[in-house]
Amino acid sequence: MRFVDEAWIVVRSGKGGRGAVSFRREKFIPRGGPDGGDGGEGGDVVFRANPDLLTLYDLRLRRIYEAKNGQGGMGRQKCGKAADDLYIDVPVGTQLFELPPLPAPDSFDDEPEEPVQTWVPEQAMDIAVDDEADEAPAIESEAPDDEPTFLVDMTEPGQTFIACRGGRGGKGNLHFASSTMRTPRFAQPGEPGEERRIKLVLKVLADVGIIGLPNAGKSTFIAAVSRARPKIAPYPFTTLTPNLGVIEHDDACRRLVLADIPGLIEGAHLGQGLGHRFLRHVERTRVLLHVVSAEDASAEGVFEAFGVVDEELRKFDPALAERPQIRVVNKIDLLTPEELAERKAAAKAAGEKLFFMSALTGEGVEAVVEALWEAAAPEAPEAEEDAWPDASGGPEEI
C-alpha cells in the first residue's frame, strides 16, 4: 500500500430527527391530547488513532464522510432512535487541522436567472429536507492555500477526537401543550449537523530516525536489522517515503521503532527535494542515526560529510540539531584496509565517536544496534503487571 502522509477530507455530522406531531386517538378517547415523540440525535464524526494503520492512503480514496441522521419522532410518545457515531480511523501520530469553508459556487451562466426569494422561518417547519441534495463541495487533490487551524495531535493509541457533533433531535408537540394551547399542531425540526474541512498530516512516531544524504545505505541498514523490506537500488532517491522497521530485544518486552527517512539534500529546510515533508518525520524521534557513505567521507574531511544534513536540521528546527545523534560511516566494504584505518585514526584524533559498518555485509552492524539500544530504548518494566495494560480498561472516548 502507498505511504500517504497528507490528506484533505470533508466530514459532516448527522442531523437531528424531526419531532412528531401526533394526538391520541384511542377507543373512548377520540380527542386525546398531543403525544408526539422527540427526534433522535444525529451521529457524531469521531477520529480515532489506530496503531495498526501506517498511512493515510484510504482517506485519499474517499473524500466525504457523513454520519447518519437521527430518526424522527413518532406517535404515542415514542422518541426516534439516535444515529450511531461515525468513527474514522487514522494512524497514530496524525495531526488534524481545520480548513476554512469553501466559498459558495457561482451560478452557471446557462441557467436562467430567478428572483431571490425570502426565507420565512415558519415555512421551514413544513418543508421536507432532502438528505441527498446537499452534497459537499469537491476537494482538490492539492493542498488548499488557506491557512489551517490546528485541532488535535493524535499521539496515543485509541485516542479519540469529536470533529463534528450531531444535531439535537427536535421536540415533539407533546412538549408544547399548555393551558392556553391544548392541541399544538407543530413540533421542532431537528438541528442540522456540523460540517468541517479537515486536513490530516501524518508525522511518523519512531524511537530512531535514520537520516543522511541520498544513497548512503539507510534502507539497506533497516532491512538488515528488521523485517522491513524497502526498495533498495544503487541510485539516489530510491526511498521516496518513510519506511518503518522494528527491532525487538531478547527479553521480548522492549522494542525499537526505526524510521528510514528519505535522503535529504542541501536546501531541504526550504522545501527543496520535498525537504519539509521528509524533515517533519524526524521531529518526534528521540535519537537520530546519521548515516554517510564511506565514498563521501574522506580521511581529511570525515566529519565534513555530516555537516550538510546537520545544517539543514538546524535551519529547519534548532531543536533537531541538538537531538542526540549516533554517527555512522557506512559502506566500508568499498574501502581498502588502509583507507579504513585512516578514517578511524582521523576520528580518534578528533576525539569524536564514529561507528564504521557495512550494512551490506553486516560488518559493524551489531555495534550500531547496541548503541541504539543504549541511547533510545525504553527501560524494561520493573513489574510484570505494569508491562502490559489491563485488557478490561479500554481508551476513554471523548
Image: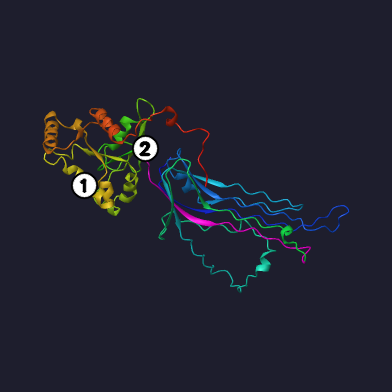
Indicate the quadrant where residue 54 lies. Answer: top left
Q: Secondary structure at mark 2?
A: strand
**Which residue is at the far bottom?**
115
**In the depicted view, which residue is nearer to us: 46 or 219?**
46
**In the depicted view, which residue is nearer to us: 338 or 247?**
247
Gap between marks 1 and 2, in whole Å? 24 Å
Q: In the visual, does 342 lie left or right of 161?
A: left
Q: Mark 1 sits on what residue?
A: 308
- Which residue is located at x 16 percent, y 41 percent? 303
Q: Which mark is residue 244?
A: 2
| Residue 358, percent from left and from top | 23, 31
| Residue 47, percent from left and from top | 50, 47
Q: Amino acid at mark 2?
A: Leu
Q: Secondary structure at mark 1?
A: helix
* One can see residue 268 in this view: no
First in sequence: mark 1 or mark 2? Answer: 2
Q: In the visual, does 315 lie left or right of 255?
A: left
- Rendered view: 173 above or below 341: below
Q: Is residue 182 magenta?
A: yes
**Which residue is at the far top?**
250
**In the depicted view, which residue is nearer to us: 100 or 163?**
163
| Residue 287, percent from left and from top | 29, 40
Q: Specify start and end residues of the magenta stretch as a single range.
A: 180-205
- Rendered view: 186 above or below 340: below
- Rendered view: 146 above or below 347: below
Q: In the visual, does 177 lie left or right of 9?
A: right
| Residue 281, percent from left and from top | 34, 45
